[in-house]
Amino acid sequence: MDSKKNKLGLIQSRGIGDIIIALPIAKHYADMGYDIYWPICEQFVKNFQDHAPWVKWIPIPNDAQGAFFYEEPMKRLKNFKCDEIICLYQALTTKPEFSQAPWFQLQHFDEYKYTRAEVPFLQKWQLNSCVTRNLEREKALKDRLVKPNQPYYVTHLEGSDFAAEPDLTHLPSEWQMINITAGVTDSVFDWCTLLEGAEALICVDSCIACMADQLQLNIEHKYWIPRSHIHLTPVLGMTWTILAAPEDSRAAHKIFATG
């Protein structure tokens, strides 16, 4: 890519975890001198507009036909006259050529994005350099939810298309449980201080898990609940205890022969 060109457009309109995964890709090119234009579904904008203001976030509406995946972002980016446009989806039903990339069968979906963008994969764990944390908002959320001087653990058990009910009886009963659910705060990054003070984090494969892993948050005990097969599961950079896949998850279906 030619760093002398000014505008780079990214196509990854959803979901929150995928956008978090791709933020270091955007920062790589921003540091090269590109202005970053990024259309995302309008309900996700509040998560990012204050934490990554160096991106030109372009809200796009959801639609029943699914144009928000590719067609609408491409139209918006062309209207902004972007010099380069990179689509980070590894597979779309309307774009079968994406899955014909020679590395498609060899990589997890997050690795695919970095290969497509020609960015070193290790930069995925440089998320700290991509986001501006609002410590005042983070502390206010923690103070609102955590009882004073009370040990606590955090759960996040619902992803965009999956929910889990893990057995947590091994955790001390005197610990307070705080469950992350939608609508408690405007941005996923507001949870960071609360997460850093937790005795443990138990979460499904989700935006919270991606954020904690990429920010390398200092949480001693982290438990990951898989929900997808290997190609749709991100690579983990930190130490996690991987729990058994729930029976109703895609991760529970064996796709490789054994023996």
Image (cartoon, rainbow, N blue to C red):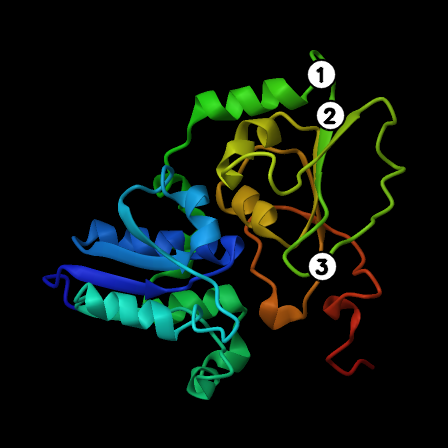
| Residue 64: % across, % down | 53, 71
Q: Amino acid at mark 2?
A: Tyr
Residue at 59%, 45% in the rendered image: 208
- Residues at marks 2 and 1, CA–CA distance in whole angstroms: 9 Å
Q: Are marks 2 and 1 in contact (CB under 8 Å)?
A: yes
Q: Disc 3 residue type?
A: Phe
Residues 206 and 105: in front is 206
Which residue is identified by label 1? Answer: 147
Residue wearing tag 3 = 162
The image's mark for residue 152 is 2
Q: Residue at point 49% right, 58% down?
A: 18
Residue neighbourhood size for the residue with mark 3, other residues' Cα within 10 Å, grouped as few (<14), some (14–19), many (≥20): some
* Quarter of the image where the C terminus is located: bottom right
Residue drawn where x is 47% and y is 87% of the image: 96
Judged left or right of residue 70, residue 14 is right
Q: Is residue 69 left or right of residue 229?
A: left
Query: Looking at the picture, which amino acid does disc 1 mark?
Result: Lys
Query: In the displayed structure, does residue 166 sit left or right of residue 179?
Result: right
**Do labels 3 and 1 touch, CB within 8 Å?**
no
For the residue pair 155 and 141, the one nearer the viewer reads as 141
